[in-house]
Image: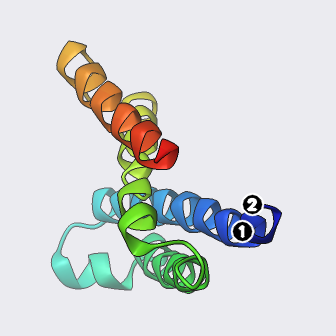
Amino acid sequence: MASLLPSYAALVASILLGVGGQIMLKMGAERSVDTVGQFLDAFTIGGLFTYALAAVFYIFAIKKIPVGLAFPSVSLSYVAVAILAHYLWDEPLGLSQFAGIALIAGGIFFLHRA
């Protein structure tokens, strides 16, 4: 398991960078009045760059972690983005969202136990 530690660290980094990229894309979208302006916005460019960096870490992670385990783990980013979106933009975070979060977390838990 210790030999997989760098791969799991890369997977966590990929997930966190993906969350950051998503948040930056949303910020760029909100600041822009048109499509061209959105793609030229610093947050949009930063978000795309952050996604690319997340992909680099993900590629490193799947060298040792089976993709059937690594890719579903990326769904933890959905949980983080839903929570951050609630606090940053007052997006809904009610019972149905918590139920979805619980299902995602449960699925990841069971995948990693196998």
Q: Nearer the viewer, residue 4 or 100?
A: 4
Q: Nearer the viewer, residue 30 or 3?
A: 3
Q: Is residue 36 above or below residue 100?
A: below
Which residue appears at 43% of the width and 51% of the height?
77
Residue 35 location, quadrant:
bottom left
In the image, residue 10 lies at what x, y percent?
Answer: 66, 70
How packed is label 2: few (under 14 Cα within 10 Å), some, or many (20 or more)? Answer: few
Find the residue positioned furthest to the top: 95
How packed is label 1: few (under 14 Cα within 10 Å), some, or many (20 or more)? Answer: few
Q: Is residue 18 above or below residue 109?
A: below
**Pointers 2 and 1 in contact (C-beta within 8 Å):** yes
The CA distance from mark 2 to mark 1 is: 5 Å
Q: Amino acid at mark 2?
A: Met
In the image, residue 36 lies at what x, y percent?
Answer: 22, 85
Residue wearing tag 2: 1
Q: Secondary structure at mark 2?
A: loop
In the image, residue 91 lies at what x, y percent?
Answer: 28, 31
Residue wearing tag 1: 4
**Total numbered labels:** 2
Residue 89 visible = no
